[in-house]
Image (cartoon, rainbow, N blue to C red):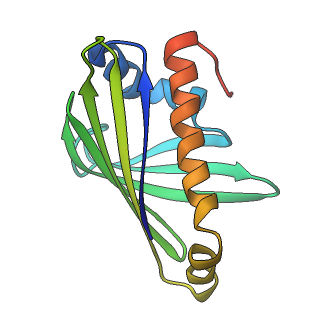
Amino acid sequence: MKYKVETIIELPRDEVIKKLDSIDNIKHWQRGLLRAEHLSGTPGHVGAKMKLSYKMGRRELDLIETITNRNFPDQFDATYETKGMHNLQYNRFESTPEGHTKWISECEFIPSSFMLKLMTKLMPGAFKKQSKKYLQDFKNFAEKGESVA
């Protein structure tokens, strides 16, 4: 399943990237994040792995993030692995004529379990809704200092 979401953040691209590229800021815009643990590689660089633990409803979910491309301020790509699901994220950051930042996130979910294959077929909107929510939460944090923590 593939889709694209985007938002305009009313800040210059360099400011957006500075806020986005801070491990300390993740908790402010990723709802449900319990902890982020560095596993290997140079933090924030290609090949680095980090374990992200989330509380979603009544269950906890662990993801392993692997950075696959880091070319700030233009792009940042990563994979996210959890039991039964492989997620590819391609993020582009463009400056607008107004001096704002357009964040374009292309997402691809590749399920390996029957249940998750079924979910991507029956509820693709739920995945897109969650991605949009993360972008909106980041926008609110970057522009207004609003935290979801």
**Which residue reaches farthest left?**
71
Above or below, 120 against 4 in this view is below
Residue 128's x, y, as percent? 55, 55
Q: Nearer the viewer, residue 41 or 58?
A: 58
Q: Which quarter shows the N terminus? A: bottom left
Quadrant in which residue 7 is drawn = top left
Describe residue 61's horizontal placement relative to residue 113 as left or right: right
Q: Nearer the viewer, residue 145 or 96?
A: 96
- Which residue is painted at 56% across and 82% down in the image? 117
Above or below, 88 against 129 in this view is below
Q: Which quarter shows the C terminus? A: top right
Q: Nearer the viewer, residue 145 or 53?
A: 145
**Which residue reaches farthest front?**
97
* Total marks placed: 0
Describe residue 60's horizontal placement relative to residue 134 as left or right: right
Quadrant in which residue 20 is drawn = top left
Quadrant in which residue 66 is drawn = bottom left
- Which residue is painted at 51% across and 58% down in the image? 63
- Which residue is painted at 52% across and 41% down in the image? 36
**Which residue reaches farthest right?**
58
Above or below, 70 against 58 in this view is above
Residue 113's x, y, as percent? 55, 85
Residue 134's x, y, as percent? 55, 39
